[in-house]
Image (spheres, helix red, strand yellow):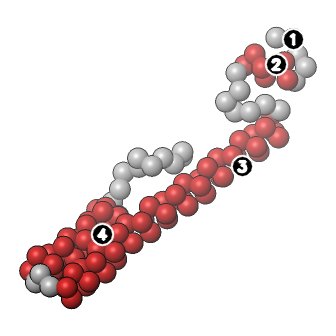
Amino acid sequence: MKWTMHEPSSPTLILVRYVLPAVVVVGGILAVIISPSLTSLEGAAGIVGAGLSIWLLNVLYRMGVKGDHERDAEQDARAFFDAHGYWPDEPAGKRRARRGEPA
């Protein structure tokens, strides 16, 4: 199965990827709105930073996983090449020419 960034996501995954960071950021903004002081502004900046950090960690994790899947696909293509002498997505005309057969 080929992996894409558009696979269906479970509700828990959506909660962790998008809802949790958004709730933390909104919580930081609400902290300033409820108590507008310098101290609450500093606390809110930390809370908003934590929410953005959660979001960024999710993005970086997905980028890392995508790289793993791309490496696996490349490894599969190389194994196919070793077994058959041509790449899986190579046009038929080039396949014969590469193997020394007339086109």
Task: Indicate the secondary structure of the residue bearing disc 2.
Answer: helix
Structural distance between the alpha carbons of marks 2 and 1: 6 Å
* Dot label at residue 76: none
Does 42 appear above or below 51?
A: below
Task: Indicate the secondary structure of the residue bearing disc 3.
Answer: helix
Residue at the farthest front position: 38
Residue that badge 2 annotates: 96
Kindly identify the amino acid type of the residue bearing the numbered disc 1: Pro
Residue that badge 4 annotates: 21
Does 53 appear above or below 1?
A: below
Structural distance between the alpha carbons of marks 4 and 3: 35 Å
Give the residue displayed 54% in from the left and 54% down from the top: 66
Give the residue displayed 72% in from the left and 19% down from the top: 92
Give the residue displayed 84% in from the left and 18% down from the top: 97
Sequence-first tag of 4 and 1: 4
* Dot label at residue 102: 1
Does 71 appear above or below 59?
A: above
How far across and down, in percent of the image, does residue 49 sit? 34, 75
In this view, the mark in front (4 or 3) = 4
Neighbor class of circle 2 (other Cα within 10 Å; few <14, some 14-19, many 20+) is some
Sequence-first tag of 2 and 1: 2
Kindly identify the amino acid type of the residue bearing the numbered disc 4: Pro
Neighbor class of circle 1 (other Cα within 10 Å; few <14, some 14-19, many 20+) is few
Task: Indicate the secondary structure of the residue bearing disc 1.
Answer: loop
| Number of marks drawn | 4
Q: Which quadrant would residue 103 be assigned to in this image?
A: top right
How far across and down, in percent of the image, does residue 28 sit? 22, 76
In this view, the mark in front (4 or 1) = 4
Does 63 appear above or below 82?
A: below
Residue that badge 3 annotates: 75
